[in-house]
Amino acid sequence: MKFLCVECDKQMAFEERHLPGDGTLAAAFRCPKCGRAVALLTNPMETQLVSSLGVKIGGTTVPAEPLQTIRGMVATGRNDAFTDGQSDSRTVGLSWSTEAQERLSRVPGFVRGMVKKIYADYAKERGIGEITPAVMDAARTELGLEGM
Amino acid sequence: MPLNIRTYHELTEPDRSGLGEQIAAQRRRLAERLAAVGRVIAVMSGKGGVGKSFVTANLARALARSGRPVGVLDADLNGPTVARLLEAAEGRLTPEGDAFLPASGADGVRVVSMTQLLADGQPLAFKGPAAESFVWRGAAEAGALRELLADIAWGTLDVLLLDLPPGMQRFLELGDLLPAPPAVLTVTIPTPESRDAVRRAMRAAVERRAPLLGVVENMVGGPFAGTAGADLAEEFETAVLARIPWHPAPDTWAVLAGRLG
């Protein structure tokens, strides 16, 4: 999927993405020459089709987690399908506030390990020592984790 | 006056989305993961109920018992059975670096199946809009299959057996995902009905330039009469690798494993 500014004959560049949480997606593209912006709006079915391919419009800022599509999309997964494994170095020196732990506990077990790791990676990369609901909100917005 | 619009392929400026590059990266990851796998073999049949999973499980065990590291991926996402046959249905996947370790089944066969991931008695259901889900469900299943190949730390394997569901769809998806078409081991029962259905699947495999390893005729000597194994082998100029009796002998599977090369 590409966008062409016909007037300038220039390929438009991706600028930003919004996931309002209702299954739809908005992605803005801008012409590098004239500055005109257009927005691509997809309905839930179209959004789902792109997600099913395991790709993100606008690209990704974090590497894909293993089995990300399965863990993120399967609705009938068993809660104990995945073990925690050995303690991950990324979680060393990182704490979770009570509120953040409570919020994490509401995430279905099938996907919880992956979500926890994504938040931990986000915090570590930014030098954040404690994960709070505010950090989780920021990560969700910044990383495009709506639905997790 | 018509607009002068360049085509998709004529637009080559770099773009942050890079959807094509994202797909290419997925393929590279899969190819790298399977680089230490000697052979990928799809156990296939155009017909349901011929015993593909039964053959897959017993062949895998025979190969493992002969000292060859073997993995089994249950590619039947909607009707997974091979994990139970390999005593790995209760296995859990453990994270290991950027992947998950497969469960260890009977005779040390490494096994991954939706049986291990789905809640008991639940069908494979995806989150997403229910209306017209056929539009995206196929893509979601192909994505799941890709991850089960690419995100499992299969390690060094002599053989990775893929237990396919009936029909050709999963084989075609594999042809798109894998760097090269998998070798095909065909399973049939003796009946002409099975022969006709399996023939279509084998034709699809040949058209995709997948090497045919041979035919396994299953449930021989039981209530199913016919010569499907020999017919298919002759038509596709391949071998009948085994005729599995209704009650397999102790060495049946070892013989098949030996013939597989």
Image (tube, coloured by chain):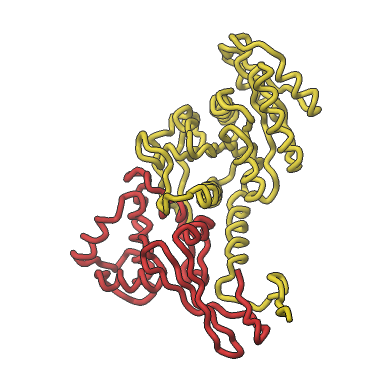
Question: A142 and B29: which one is in front?
Answer: A142
Q: Is residue B162 above or below residue A2?
A: above
Residue A65 visible in rendering: yes
- Closest to the observer: B176 or A4? A4
In the orientation shown, which residue stands out farthest toward the left? A98
Between B190 and B184, which is closer to the camera in this rendering? B190
Image quadrant holding the C terminus of chain B, namely: top right
Residue B151, percent from left and from top: 51, 52
Percent x, y for residue B127? 40, 51
At horizontal 51% and vertical 47% (from top left) the residue drawn is B134
Foreground residue, A105 or A26? A26
Would you identify the image quadrant in which residue B217 lies? top right
Q: Residue at x 51, y 34 (%)?
A: B109
In the figure, B112 relative to A100: above or below? above
Which residue occupies 61% across, 27% down? B47
Q: Does residue B199 sit above or below A109 in this rendering?
A: above
Relative side of B220 to A86, left or right: right
Percent position of residue A8, x then y: 66, 87
Which chain shows up in red?
A
Q: How many marks?
A: 0
Q: Where is residue B95 drawn, in percent x and y?
A: 42, 51
Q: Colour of chain B?
A: yellow
Horizontally, is B218 left or right of B239 in the view?
A: left
Residue at 30 percent across and 69 percent down: it is A136
Q: Is residue B255 visible?
A: no
